[in-house]
Amino acid sequence: ARADRMSITAEIKAINNKFDGSPFSSVGYLILEGLQPGKNLTWNLLWQKRINSFLDLNLSYFGRESAQARTIHTGSMQLRAFF
């Protein structure tokens, strides 16, 4: 197996939540999965790279926006070792 394998995955979702309760309550937050009532947009990008036969590097980015809230950007980096 080649050690330089790489993959990129991207996803974009348009979501329209019709919700009558309070989005700021703990139950409302869970039901809406952190999004807001109305139109929402989410996107994510995952880049994976096999460094060698026992190390993988993953970089991920997630964003979401709605008309009622500022755009939120999050990212993470993961280095995995197999032994």
Image (cartoon, grey):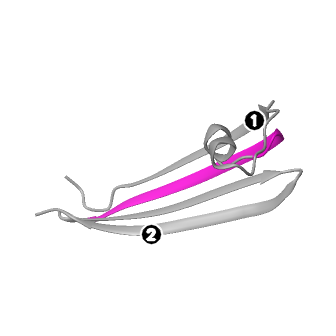
Per the rendered image, the range of residues in magenta is 36-51
Q: State the residue at coordinates (78%, 37%).
A: 21
Number of callouts: 2
Q: Nearer the viewer, residue 73 or 19?
A: 19
Residue 74's quadrant in the figure? bottom right
* Lower sequence index among marks 1 and 2: 1
> Is residue 68 left or right of 60 when viewed as pictured?
right
**Mark 1 to mark 2 CA distance (whole Å):** 27 Å
Membership of 37 in magenta stretch: yes
Q: State the residue at coordinates (72%, 46%).
A: 35
Q: Position of residue 10 (x, y in %)?
A: 58, 47
What secondary structure prevails in the magenta region? strand
Q: Position of residue 64 (x, y in %)?
A: 72, 53
Quarter of the rendering occupied by the C terminus? bottom left
Residue 54's quadrant in the figure? bottom left
Q: Helix or strand or loop: what does disc 2 sit on?
A: strand
Q: For residue 7, which numbered disc appears in the image?
A: none
Extreme residue toward the right, this view = 67
Residue holding disc 1? 15
> Is residue 44 left or right of 22 when viewed as pictured?
left
Residue holding disc 2? 77
**Type of the residue with mark 1:** Ile
Q: Helix or strand or loop: what does disc 1 sit on?
A: strand
Q: Is residue 47 above or below residue 52?
A: above
Number of other residues with Cα within 10 Å of mark 1, as a class: few under 14, some 14 to 19, many 20 or more: some
**Type of the residue with mark 2:** Met
Number of other residues with Cα within 10 Å of mark 2, as a class: few under 14, some 14 to 19, many 20 or more: few
Q: Nearer the viewer, residue 26 or 54?
A: 26
